[in-house]
Image (cartoon, helix red, strand yellow):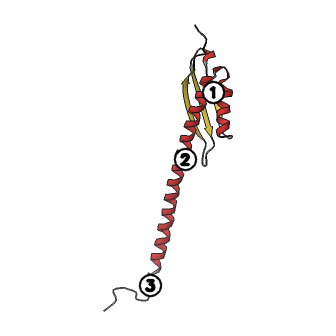
Amino acid sequence: MPSTRSDPGRSDAGYVTVEAAIMFTALTVVVGLVVAGIVTVASYLGAVDLARDAARAAALDPGNATGAASSVVSSVDADAQVSVSGGGGAGTDLITVQVTRPGHLFDLSATAVIVAEPSGESQ
C-alpha cells in the first residue's frame, strides 16, 4: 500500500500531544474562571445578607444605629466596613446601611434600606 504523505520521513505524531496540552490548559482556565465566578457570587450574597442584618439592627436601635450595625458586621467579618445614613433624627424614617467586604479579586459592596422601628413612646 503506497504512502499518501508527501514527505514520508516526517512524522506528525507529536502534534496530538501538543494539541492535548493546549486543550487541557484551556479547559483548566475555563473551569478556574467558573469557580472564581461562583465564589464571587457567593461572597456577594454574603455581603447582601450582612447588610440586611446590619440594617435590621440599626432599625431596632435608631439612636445608636451606627454602633448597632457595626457590632453586627464586626461579629461576622472583622475586615468588613459599614456606613450608616439616615435615621429618625434627621426627619426621615429610612436607614441605609452599606457594607463593603474585601474579596479575593475586588471589594464587594451591598446596600440595604429599612424603615426605622417606632420608638415605643405613645403618641
Residue 119 location in percent, x, y?
A: 61, 15
Element type at marker 1? strand
Residue 112 image-quadrant placement: top right
Residue named by callout 3: 11
Residues 29 and 87: in front is 87
Residue named by callout 2: 40
Element type at marker 3? loop
Residue 84 tag number: 1
Residue that appears at 65% across and 33% down: 72
Which amino acid does the dot numbered 3 rest on? Ser
Residue 54 location in percent, x, y?
A: 61, 31
Residue 1 image-quadrant placement: bottom left
In the rendered structure, which disc, 3 or 2, sits on the residue that comes first in sequence? 3
Quarter of the picture containing the C terminus is: top right
Residue that appears at 52% across and 54% down: 35
Element type at marker 2? helix
In the rendered structure, which disc, 2 or 1, sits on the residue that comes first in sequence? 2
